[in-house]
Image (spheres, grey):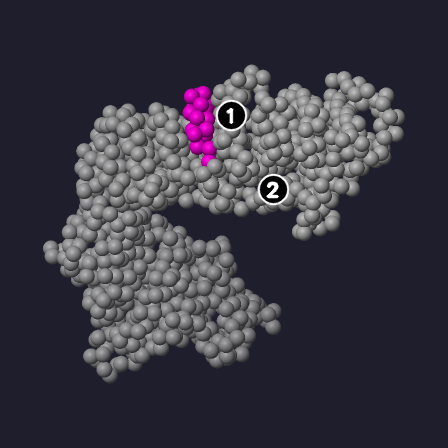
Amino acid sequence: MDFELFNFDEDDDLLSTACIEATQGQLTAPQQTQPFDGVVEETVLPELQCSGEDTTHAKFASEGFVRSGFMLTRPEYAWRDASAGLTLTEFEFGLKQLLGHNNVQYLIGTSCMHIQHLWASVRQPLNTNDTYNHRQRRKEVTHMFYWMLLHITDEQWTFLRPSLESIRHLVNRTTEADTWKLIYFASSCKGNDCNAAAYHLLHGVLEWKLLDLCILYKFELCAPKVLLDDNAKPSSAFINQLTLLFEDLITCSLYLYGKKRPAELLYASPFPCTCIKECWLYVQLALQKWSLTTFAVATEQLTFWQLFNETITKFKSKLDKFSLTTLSLAEFTNWLLHALVRLFGYRSNGQYVGPRYERALADTAENVDALEQCTQQFLNGNPSEEQTRVYICLLMPTLLNWWRPRVAIPVLLWEHFHKRLNTSFYAAGSAPSNLAVACASGKAYVERYRALLKQEELTADANLSSYTLFTILLGKNLMRLLESSATRHQAQKLLGRIYTKFSAQKFLALNEMGIHHLIELFLALAICGDFEELAPKLSAKLLSIALDKIPAGRQIAVAKGHMALLILYAERRCEIGEYATKLLQQLTAINNDLSVSKVLADGLLEIFMHADDFRRGEHLLIDAWLPNYLETCTPVEQDRSLEALHLIFGKLQRNEALIESNSELLKALNALVLPFVKQQFAYGYSQWLPQLAADFSTQACTVPDTQTFQKLFNCFIEAPVACRQALPQYLNKVLQTERAALIEPNVVIHVWLKSLVQLTAVNEDVAQLTRYVSQLAEFRMMTDNLSPEELLQAKEPLCVFIAAVGKHYDACAAHHQRRFRIADNLNAYLRNFDKWLQVDLKQEKTEVAFRFYSFLAIVIYNCAHIVYTKSKVNCFFHVVMTRFVLPTNVQMGKAPDGKLAQVVHKIWPVLVQGIGKLNFKADPYISKTLTDLIQKWTPHFKISPNAKMVARPFVSCLQSDNAELSLFVFEKLTSLFLATQRRQADPNACLVVTIFQEVIESIDANNTSDDILTKRLETFMKATSLLMLEHIMMVDEVVPSRALLLDLFKRIVSSATYKRAAGLQQLLAEHLRLLTKKHLAYYTFFFFELLQRLAQFTPDTILQIMDFLLAEMRVVEQKRGAGEDNRMRGCLQKLQQTLKGAR
């Protein structure tokens, strides 16, 4: 462009006339109008104030055209005062200078120079010494337009029109496509403080074009009588400029579109900055206001969408110029239209209201035909999956939130998608997890698509496949069509177009992905449409895909669709009998395939949850396929199916009136499910098995030809269950029903005791049983009214109960009948106790084994007279001994399992003390049992290197109150393991001596009274010292036990208890006298060796027997008849010397 367009040599003339009043007759001063009452003095002329790149929630500037209501909500004269004080150029031209023709020409020329300068600065920075910056140049041009708009009269317009056309022509030429490419992105968050030439050219051009449109509207449309010539139409310039503004704004968005990837279109605004969006909104508002005047363009109402559509059509001939294709143009049009539709939700003051605003509800707010053509053009362009997703996402808010429901575009999309049902709709480059895959079950299908169809977000998730997005659009659109009676016929039209594309042959040609997409479509229609009308048609079409005619993978996919529909049937309380029958016939045709059965089983719970009375055919789903599936499915799958079955019983129990009307259902359950429950109750671990067992037991006899309660209850209660928690769970659940009155108390206590042994008292189910048992009358009778609180608060209720029973039994010595009853009841509680533990102890949990053996010991300790019956081989005592404590391998001397040795070591003293309450001296069986406990188990008590732990059972035995029992135990222990043969000790002699050492240490370490300690040591010495002395005398010196025993005697004689008890000293001396009498004649040397050893640490004891020893020596010599025995006398002399030295 030429910078010398105007000749500035006339500046002097202009300056000389700048302040002269107008003399031209053709110009008259403008008429002043009355000021607008509502305008304050600080009214500021609008200008575009940028806030940066546009976003959905960006607000318009308060000083902009929209929020100020310029020429729309605020009339023209409201702005005159604000513009009257403006001055232009460095010569400070004021409003009065508009009266001079030359002045006006000068101002227009200056404005053109400013426009050219901004344009050139965008192309290349200019080195000018101007005092004007870019903002001032833009502002002066804008102010000049304001003067023209607000202050010239109709008469002046005739003469000024050519001048304005020249500047309009310059602005239009300045903003051709090449220039827009340089400035469309010139937004700035600094607003007008930005000094970039591109920024001010972009925003200046937008201001000038808007003001130019206002000028044209005012002087050409509102005053058409003022014509330039007879052939010109007053509206032609206005329409041309309006159309050109649309082209300019679309061009800016086109350049922005070229920089975006398809996925970015979802969240990016098509408006490069908020000012361009403001221009679009201002044009919308202006056209709406102007179309209401009596001056219509070409006698037709001018609408926003009419101009938009015509402008888009022009761009179809410019595809190459913008590097577009018909596909990309359609994609761009949809993107821009999506944003423009949203502008109809704004008030005239720039406040956003939304789709319910009256502007958005007007007929002129819709552009359906154009969008339909755009969609057709897009689909014909063979778009990629990513493009299709974005297109539908942008389409959905427009069709579902802003415009009235129609069927044309959904039908177009269906025509596109029905040919591609077998496609995966996978977007290249996206994560594999986003690949459209079938849901895990029918319930998952329903939940997924119900959630998708109920989402309220205006922007859909582009991670969904394009087909899924289409079904969401289709479903929501169908829902809107059915909301009004005026559009219901369109819903039928839409459904008809969908149904015509289906045939049995096409269904059978679908692959797994195609079936998945078919299910998506059916669910969208079923959830959003009239279900009662659609359900029979949809189920029939799905049943037409016969399971026996398709491969296994497709069978599973179709089954999921069936279950999804059946769940919807159940939710809507529809009859499912016919549908279920046909489906199960197809399942039978494929031999109740396990994979397909799994799909059916997964949906049972959801179906039964919605069954009110099971009168709509739900019982037909309980068929032969179910037990077959339950036996082969995984535990998790089994749990879900069993939960569904329990749901049936739960609903029937809450309404007993339903039981009679559902006899067929109960018969099916008893015939098909009960055998499975019986089997699995014994071997399974599902938490639902006890519940179902209780359900069947509770409902026993309510239907003819079923088992009685007692028979079924006994079946479950006597079952050898693998899951030990199942039994108390089952009993608790039955006890909570009316059937509790039919259960014998001894059965409850039997299960309670068994559970206390196999589980723990803190187990929730066991604790519940404990609370129940504590309230039983039989419990009070057995325990002599033991306080329930004492039982409930006890750490081990088992011990408290057994101890109370034993105590009560002993206290009833005079009441034989009561004793018999207590004994009978306790033996009933303990029946089959030998089955409470696994046969192979190695397979049993250690804690359970300890609890079981402790239980055996507790019972024998507290109730020995109850559980032992002489000569009765099946009594509790005999079974305990022969099966658990003294089994055959232990009796044969074989080493027991390590776990068993630890358990018996722990309970041994309790068992022994319990047996000690029986007549172990007079009863040979008890005596032998006690002897075997000592003989067979002592060698196996070497379970730890800690001697104190090994000796603990014997220490406990000695510390008991039964002195006779302790004497018996230690006598047997000594005689069995310290007897010598051929001067050799027993292999376990050292173990026994070590035990004795710990026993002696425990006596001195105990804080009991001196009398008790003396009594214990006396018992020990009575039982052991004679044989221990004989052992020392008879074994070789190299035998380890000899030295250990000598050390033991040192400990004894040096202990405080021994020293203060003269009786103990006399006891030891007496034992030495017995040895003297027994062994002096035959084992003279060994005997004197023993005395020699003892004399070293207890000479006083030896001195006590010296007189007896000398007397016995003389007797021996006399019997021998050879006079004094020199060898014997030599031994005596050595002993005397030792005694002398010891003193």
Amino acid type of disc 2? Leu
Would residue 492 be found to the left or right of residue 150 on screen?
left
Main SS of the magenta part reads helix
Would residue 112 be found to the left or right of residue 812 on screen?
right
Instruction: State which quarter of the image contains the C terminus.
Output: bottom right
Check the image and name the residue furthest to the front. 25
In the image shown, does 957 or 791 lie closer to the viewer? 791
Would residue 83 be found to the left or right of residue 17 on screen?
left
Task: Give the residue pinned by disc 2.
Answer: 72
Task: Give the residue pinned by disc 1.
Answer: 310
Residue 815 screen position, x and y as percent: 23, 82
Amino acid type of disc 1? Glu
* The residue stretch that appears in magenta: 366-384
**Front position among marks 1 and 2:** 2
Question: Which tag, 1 or 2, sits closer to the chain's start?
Answer: 2
Say whether residue 880 is magenta.
Answer: no
User: Residue, x 39% and y 75% (percent of image)?
Assistant: 790
